[in-house]
Amino acid sequence: DILTEREDVSFLCVGAGDSSKYQKKVQKHLKQKILFPGKRNDVESIMSVCNIGVLSTFTEGIPNTVMEYMALAKPIVATNGGGVSELVIDKETGFLIPEQDKKAMKDKILELLDNPELAKKMGVAGKNRIQTEFGIEKMVKSYYSIYEKLCAE
């Protein structure tokens, strides 16, 4: 377990919804290390204190959380489900791991914590990817191109 191996790690579990069933699973001695602040609108300020963006999901479209992490130059450790692989390039902008592979999740988080240069490199690569591939300019150009094709028909 990361929290028993490392004194310098905490987890923030941010999001809307009922987290009480997850909070009950947290061992008493770890309650100060796994925090559930609930739904927040100040994502940027929260992520600014984080070193790594982590997403463990079974299926999801293109997750906003991963885009937000990447836009803030945070390396990603995420399960390879849904549209996550459309955002994260494995071993370049972060790590994609198999669903429900707790050991791989732990190993990749520790790898980034133990290698700050790698974490920074992946974070910068992720930020560049979001800016070039998912930015507003690219989206507008894509819509304009579709519009032109439709009008030409």
Image (tube, grey):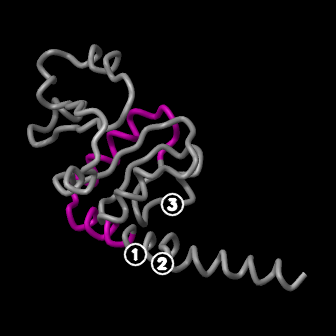
Is the residue 86 above or below the residue 53 in the image?
Answer: below
Queried whether the magenta region covers residue 108, the answer comes back as: yes
In percent of the image, x 28 and y 33: which residue is there?
A: 38
User: What residue would you read off at disc 3?
Assistant: 87
- Left or right: 30 with respect to 127? left
Q: Residues within 10 Å of mark 2 (few under 14, many from 20)?
A: few
**CB under 8 Å between discs 3 and 2:** no
**CB under 8 Å between discs 1 and 2:** yes
At label 3, the amino acid type is Leu
Q: CA distance from mark 1 to mark 2?
A: 6 Å
Q: Residues within 10 Å of mark 3 (few under 14, many from 20)?
A: many
Query: Residue 16 sits in which quadrant?
Result: top left
- Left or right: 45 with respect to 55? left
Which stretch appears magenta? 97-125
Q: Quadrant of the N terminus?
A: top left
Query: Residue 48 sits in which quadrant?
Result: bottom left
Q: Which mark is residue 128?
A: 1
In the image, residue 36 lies at what x, y percent? Answer: 24, 30
Query: Residue 145 sits in which quadrant?
Result: bottom right
Question: Which sits earlier in the primary sequence, circle 3 or circle 2?
Answer: 3
Is the residue 117 above or below the residue 7 in the image?
Answer: below
Q: Please name the predominant secondary structure of the magenta segment in the image.
A: helix
Q: CA distance from mark 3 to mark 1?
A: 11 Å
> The residue tagged with tag 3: helix, strand or loop?
helix
In percent of the image, x 33 and y 59: which residue is there?
A: 75
User: What residue would you read off at disc 2?
Assistant: 132
- Left or right: 62 with respect to 129? right
- Left or right: 137 with respect to 52? right
In the image, residue 18 lies at what x, y percent? Answer: 37, 22
In the image, residue 77 lies at what x, y percent? Answer: 38, 49
Q: Quadrant of the C terminus?
A: bottom right
